[in-house]
Image (tube, helix red, strand yellow):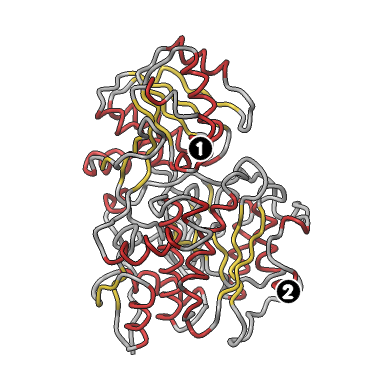
Amino acid sequence: MRKLRRLLPLLAVIFAFALIAAACGDDDSGDAADTTAAPAETTAAPAETTAAPAETTAAPAAAEPVNVCELAYFTGEFAAYGPSLTADVRFPIEQVINLDPPLGRTWNLISEDIGTPGEAQAARTCVEQHAAEIVVSQAHGYRTYRDFMLEWIAENDWPLGPTVHGGTIPGNLGGVGSEPLFRAQGLDEALGAGGVFYAETQGVEKIVVFATQVEGFQLAAGAAEKAAEAVGIEVLARIDVPAEQPSYRAEAERIVELAPDAVIVQAGSVESGTLIKQAAEAGLSLYWIGETGWIQPEFIGTLGVDPIATQKGIGYVAFSYNDGTPAWEFYQPLWDDTPGYGDEFGPATDQYHFSTYDLMTHTALAVEYAGSYAASAWAPAMFAVGDPPGTVCYNYPECLALIRAGEDIDYEGVTGDGSYTAGGVNTLLNSYTPFNTDGTVGEAVILDTARALEIIDEIKVEAECASPNPAGTDPASPECTW
C-alpha cells in the first residue's frame, strides 16, 4: 500500500525561493457573517449545477459529479480579467481532466463572482449552496472568513483549496488537511521585492513606489520598500492611490518632479497603463517595473504601443515557464490550438494560463493518489505526487496511468518541479519580462536567485498564530493574525 509522504520542513532559503507571485485579487473587507447574498445574475453556473440547500453539509455521493467552485472576477476592479481567469480554470477541467476524471467522477465548474458580493459570501455560497468539494482561488478576502472555512473543514473534511490568487495569505498557513491551501503563484510580497532586484541590475539608485489601495498590491509595495532599503536603493516616495480612477495625471506629474530612475508599480493593468501613458505624455522616461497582471491584454490596450519606445524599459516581475520538457509539449499546443482559449485569451505563455493548468492538474492527480476527496487525504497527497522519489511524469494522462498501476510519481509540470513548501506554496523561478516596442512580450530574464533568497527571507510576512500551530503543522489554529 502506498504511503503518502508529507513534505519535510524546508530550509528558509527554499521557502523564500517560492515567494514570487501574481497579485491579482479582491480587497474584500467585509465580514462573512454580515455580507449579503450574491445576486443571482453573478453566478455563472446554470441552475442545474446548484447541488445542495444551505443546510446540507454532507459530501455528495461518490457517483455524483464533483462541483468545482471558482471564486471569480466578473465585477469590480478586476472584472476585465474575469473571462480569461475563468477560462484558465475551465481549460484543464474540460480539455484534460474530464476525459478520464480522478476516481471516475467528472468535474462540474461553477463560478461565483466575488467582485460585488465579496469573497467571503462567494466562498460560503460555494460550500453551503453548491456543496463544492473543491474551491478554487481563495485570495485577498480570506482573513474575513478563515474561521468559517476552518470550522467547515473540521466538520466535513472538505473543500480542497487550490488557489491561483492566494498570494496575500501568509506562507505559514496552509499545506495541511485542516487548512488545505496550495498556491500556484507564490506570495505577493515577492512581486515588489523582485522589482527592486531587477532595478538593482540596471544600476537604479532612486525609485518611487506606486500602489493602488488593494491588499495584495499594498503588501507587495511594502516589500519593495523593505527590499530597496536592504540593497541600498533610495525610495523617494511611496504613492498610494484609490483603484479604478479614470486618471492618474496628478500622480504622474508628481513622479516627474521627483525624477526617479525607476517606478515600482503595484496596480491593476488598466490603472498601470493609464499612469505610464500620462507620465510619458509629461515627458518622463525611466524604468517601469510592474506585476504579473500586466500580461493581461488590458495593459497594452490601455497604454498603447507608442509610449514603450520612449521609456528606458517597461516590464513585469513574475515567474517563468519551462518550455524544454514534455510537459510543455503536451500543454502548449493544446491551449493554443483549442478554440475558445489561445485564440480568445492569448498564448500559452501567459502566467495565469500555465500556472492554473499546472495547479488543477496537480490537484486531480493528488485526488486519484489519495483515493479520496477528503482534505485530510488530499493535502499530503499534493506533496506525494510532486516530490521524489517516484517515476517522473509530465502530464495528467501519463501520470494518472502510473498512479492507477500502483506506482509513486513525481509530477513535473510547466511551472516547475511540482514541489511545495510546508505551508503549501509552489516553488518558482523569479523572472522579469520586458515588453517589446510593438507591445509583444520579450524573453524572460531570470533574476539572481541567490540575491533574491538573501533578501526575501528577511522581509517575508508570516501569520502569528496561537498554539498549537507552528508553521506548517496540523491542526491549523483559527487564532492567527497578519
Q: Which residue is mark 1?
A: 217
Residue 258, relative to residue 423: is it above or below? Answer: above
Apparent side of residue 477 relative to residue 189 in the rendered image (left or right): right
Q: Nearer the viewer, residue 238 or 110?
A: 110
Q: Position of residue 435 (x, y in %)?
A: 37, 34
Q: Which residue is mark 2?
A: 48
Instruction: Please give the name of the residue rendered at 66% of the width and 80% of the height, measured from the top-left corner.
Output: 58
Q: Nearer the viewer, residue 459 or 337?
A: 337
**Amino acid of disc 1:** Phe
Q: Residue furthest top?
A: 257
Instruction: Please give the name of the residue rendered at 43% of the width and 64% of the height, measured from the top-left corner.
Output: 175
- How far is mark 2 from mark 1, CA to CA? 37 Å
Q: Nearer the viewer, residue 171 or 368?
A: 368
Q: Position of residue 361 (x, y in %)?
A: 42, 69
Q: Secondary structure at mark 1?
A: helix
Residue 255, relative to residue 265: is it above or below? Answer: above
Q: Position of residue 250 (x, y in %)?
A: 57, 15
